[in-house]
Image: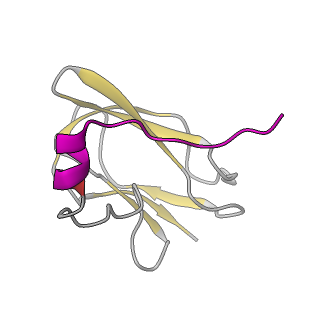
Amino acid sequence: GILVPALAMSVEEYQLAKHMRPPLPPSTSLSNKQLLSPMPGVLLGFAVREGDVVELDQELCTVEAMKMQNVLRSTRKGGVVTKLCVGVGDTVRPEDVLIEFD
């Protein structure tokens, strides 16, 4: 057998989805040298430290928004964490820089 990715939605959801902009890739910047917060919330913690080499899809940090914990993962391989830009417990806004990479 084969696996086929599928998305189930109602007729109403499908009609509305046709008018929505495609989502931006999560937690990325144009230069791919920064991890940006995709939502407002509170930074709960980092899973990396300065100097760590980052692998693709590695857990980087967790942001709590609306009582849900959202794990932010890397979208690149081989970058080095150069700076953790916010502190644990800090409130973040969408597009705030959370981590910088080399």
Q: Position of residue 66 (x, y in %)?
A: 15, 26
Q: What residue is at 33 percent from the left and 25 percent from the top? A: 69
Q: Is residue 11 magenta?
A: yes
Q: Quadrant of residue 28?
A: bottom left
Above or below, 40 relative to 25: above
Image x and y of residue 21, in percent: 23, 67
Q: Main secondary structure of the magenta part?
A: loop
Which of 29 and 2 lies nearest the eye of the viewer? 2
Q: Residue at x 40, y 36 (%)?
A: 8
Which residue is at 19% across, 53% downward?
Answer: 15
**Residue 13 screen position, x and y as percent:** 21, 43
47 sits to left or right of 78: left
Q: Quadrant of the N terminus?
A: top right
Q: Farthest residue toward the bottom?
A: 31
Outermost residue, right direction? 1
Left or right: residue 69 versus residue 72 is left
Q: Which residues are magenta?
A: 1-16
**Picture quadrant where residue 48 is located:** top right
